[in-house]
Image: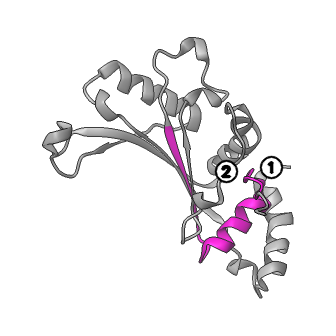
C-alpha cells in the first residue's frame, strides 16, 4: 500500500475520530515537501555546487532551484545576489513517493537514529528534519560521492496546530522518539 492510499484509507478516519472532524476536507494533510541545502563556506567551490545539484536530482527526481542572498553580509563574505543554496519543492505523487522512501528506507539507514524529536513539529504543524549526511538516501552511492553534505527536509502540512500535525505524522508512520518516563 502506498503512503497516499494509507492516508486516504487509515489516517483520515483516525484523525476524524480523534479530533471530531465533520468533513474529510477538514482533516490535515501534507501539502508539500521542501528539500534544502545551504552551501556554507564552500559557496565559491564550483565542484561542490555541481555535486549538490546532482545529489538533489537523484534524491528528489527533479532539478533544484538555486537560492540567492537577499542582502550582503561582509563577515560571511556574501554579496547580494550571490548563490548560497539549492532547494527542491515536491508536491503530489512525487511528494508521497519521496515521503514513503524517507520513512521506510532513509530513516532506518541513519547512523545512531533514535527517532524524530516531537519538538521538530512547529506551531503550524510542519515537520523539519535535518540530515548530517546525504548517504542515508538509497539513490546516493557512497563510492560516487566526492563531498558528503547535509540537507534539511521541511514537510509542510495544513494542520492548525502542533498537536494535529504531530498526530498526522504519527499516523503516517514517522518514527518519533519514545517519551522517557521521568521519576
Local secondary structure at mark 1:
loop
Quadrant of the image occupied by residue 52: top left
| Position of residue 119 measured from the top left corner of the image (x, y, whole percent) | 59, 60
Above or below, 76 relative to 178: above
Above or below residue 1? Residue 181 is below
Residue drawn at point x = 70 percent, y = 38 percent? 113
Instruction: Point out the stretch of residues depicted in magenta.
Output: 151-179
Q: Position of residue 165 (x, y in %)?
A: 65, 68
The reply, left or right, for residue 39 in relation to residue 141 is: left
**Residue ID at (57%, 63%):** 126
Residue bearing mark 2: 116
Q: Nearer the viewer, mark 2 or mark 1?
A: 2
Camera-side residue of 29 and 92: 29
Q: Quadrant of the C terminus?
A: bottom right
Give the quadrant of residue 84.
Answer: top left
Looking at the image, which residue sits at the far front?
183
> What residue do we see at 67% from left, 33% from top?
110
Residue 100 x %, y %: 73, 46
Dot 1 corresponds to which residue?
Answer: 2
Residue 78 visible, this orientation: no
Image: 154 above or below 20: above
Mark 1 neighbour class, 10 Å CA radius: few under 14, some 14 to 19, many 20 or more:
few
Front position in the image: 100 or 163: 163
User: Is residue 53 something that shows in the picture?
Assistant: yes
Kindly report the distance in space between the C-alpha atoms of the residues bearing marks 2 and 1: 22 Å
Q: Where is residue 27 drawn, in percent x and y? A: 71, 76
Q: Secondary structure at mark 2?
A: loop
Amino acid at each position: 500500500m502506498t503512503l497516499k492510499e494509507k492516508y486516504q484509507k487509515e489516517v483520515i478516519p483516525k484523525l476524524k475520530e480523534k479530533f471530531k472532524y465533520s468533513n474529510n476536507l477538514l482533516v490535515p494533510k501534507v501539502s508539500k515537501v521542501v528539500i534544502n541545502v545551504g552551501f556554507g563556506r564552500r559557496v565559491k567551490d564550483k565542484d561542490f555546487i555541481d555535486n549538490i545539484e546532482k545529489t538533489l536530482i537523484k534524491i528528489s527526481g527533479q532539478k533544484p532551484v538555486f537560492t540567492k542572498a537577499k542582502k550582503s553580509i561582509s563577515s560571511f563574505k556574501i554579496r547580494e545576489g550571490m548563490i548560497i543554496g539549492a532547494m527542491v519543492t515536491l508536491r503530489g505523487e512525487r511528494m508521497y513517493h519521496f515521503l514513503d522512501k524517507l520513512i521506510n528506507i532513509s530513516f532506518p539507514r541513519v547512523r545512531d537514529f533514535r527517532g524524530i524529536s516531537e519538538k521538530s513539529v512547529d506551531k503550524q504543524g510542519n515537520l523539519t528534519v535535518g540530515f548530517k549526511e546525504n548517504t542515508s538516501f538509497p539513490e546516493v552511492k557512497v563510492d560516487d560521492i566526492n563531498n558528503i553534505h547535509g540537507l534539511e527536509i521541511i514537510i509542510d502540512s495544513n494542520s492548525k496546530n502542533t498537536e494535529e500535525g504531530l498526530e498526522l505524522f504519527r499516523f503516517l508512520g514517522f518514527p518519533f522518539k519514545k517519551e522517557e518516563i521521568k521519576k
